[in-house]
Amino acid sequence: MKTAAAPSLAFALLLLGTTLGLAGTDLVLPAVPDLPEVLGGSAAMAQLVLAAFVAGGCLGLILFGELGARADQRRLLVGSLIAYALVSLACALAPSLPALVGLRFLHGLSGAAAAVFAPGMIRAMFSEAGAVRALGLMGSVESLVPALAPVAGVWLLAAFGWTSSFYLIAVLSLIVAVLVRALGSSLPVPPPTRSQGSYIRLLKNPTYMRYALSQACTLGGLLIFVFGAPAMMTKALGLSLNAFILMQVTGIAFFILASNVAGRLADMFGSERMILAGSAISAFGLMALSIYGNAGGTDALVITALFVPVNLGLGLRGPPGFFHAILASDGDDARGAALVILFILSMTATGTALAAPLVTAGLSPLAGVAASFSCISVILLASLRPLKAL
């Protein structure tokens, strides 16, 4: 079902909802080191404030994926945003660090709906080309959150204290909930599941798994490298954090550029070609980083240059790849989107754990672990049948 009713406004509301979900980690991040002094507890327990949010978010993906296949997603989105706001307020009023950790699990759970429902709603609002462009724009904005939200978090922490991030999330979530409720007609009702949908059915669908797992492996490869890069660059290569900042800002810029032209290029050359080419380019960048590190390379500018294709490839394949995963779910959009995001989190967590003992060993080991995940994406695309073959 397509709708012409203010698609730009509807898209903006979905973008705000997904951005607020991401901000639940990045905006709060600067306050974490000070929490033991304010609320009691240890530094290790303070890190659980982040881990509990991610764990709750994983459960929320599965929960809202199931609910979204059975109920009106617009009402679920409003309810999720209200719950997210209320739990944010409760976090700000937490009397102790253990209480905050428990509330953060609920925080992540309640904030997961927008990420689950947005792809299916975007699919219902736009044509295929328009949906790919919209997903590219959404990915561009979301890529800025990890870079900008911590900066805002530092300012809020210095000006108003550790609770201010939670109060801001609460207020913004309530505003978006009110707008979604008042302007609900602008949000489409995604097509109903055309068959007996389930997570098991999706896991048994090789075409869906082709797109979902390849998306997760390509993005996971990039995130594995990014998460380990600060320690690798400062401890193993003797570089400053400015080198990491340069690499990351440059990479984000090329990702934004690529993700915003991905739709046009997919129209010109075909979505399948863009998905495969983008995956291969990203894998090539990580392999080149590993080879450069194995040769003893440590130059920050060379590392930055080799990191460009990693982001460029993800930007080219990301929007059409996610859209094709939703198409391959055969109308089970909510569960399909939930599984893609869950796969991304799982791949990233697994790869980060595998790379953790290697980050101080140099560039090559970290890039090698990341490249192995990215190469799996290319193998999956080459070995499983594409959507057009159905």
Image: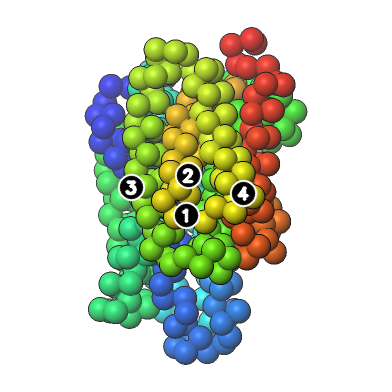
Which amino acid lies under the numbered mark 3 shown in the image of this protein? Leu
Q: Secondary structure at mark 2?
A: helix
- Label of residue 284 in the image: none
Asked whether 152 or 54 is in front, the reply is 152
- Asked if residue 325 shows in the view, the reply is no
- Asked if residue 166 shows in the view, the reply is yes
Query: Marks 2 and 4, how far apart in space?
Result: 17 Å
User: What residue is drawn where x is 29% and y is 79%?
Assistant: 158
Which amino acid lies under the numbered mark 4 shown in the image of this protein? Ala
N-terminal of the pair, mark 4 or mark 3, is 3
Q: What residue is shown with label 1? A: 299
Residue 195 rendering spot, x and y as whole percentages: 64, 21
Q: What residue is shown with label 4? A: 295
Q: Dividing the picture into quarters, in which one does residue 92 lie?
A: bottom left
Which amino acid lies under the numbered mark 2 shown in the image of this protein? Phe
Q: What residue is shown with label 3? A: 16
Closer to us: mark 3 or mark 1? 1
User: What residue is drawn where x is 38% and y is 63%?
Assistant: 242
Query: Marks 3 and 1, how far apart in space?
Result: 38 Å
Q: Label 4: few (<14), some or many (≥20) within 10 Å?
A: few
Q: What residue is shown with label 2? A: 307
Query: Marks 2 and 3, how far apart in space?
Result: 29 Å
Q: Is residue 132 above or below residue 43?
A: above
User: What residue is drawn where x is 34% and y is 68%?
Assistant: 153
Query: Marks 4 and 3, how far apart in space?
Result: 44 Å
N-terminal of the pair, mark 3 or mark 1, is 3
Q: For the N terminus, give its image quadrant.
A: top left
Closer to us: mark 2 or mark 4? 4
Which amino acid lies under the numbered mark 1 shown in the image of this protein? Asp
Q: For the C terminus, give its image quadrant.
A: top right
Residue 246 rendering spot, x and y as whole percentages: 37, 55
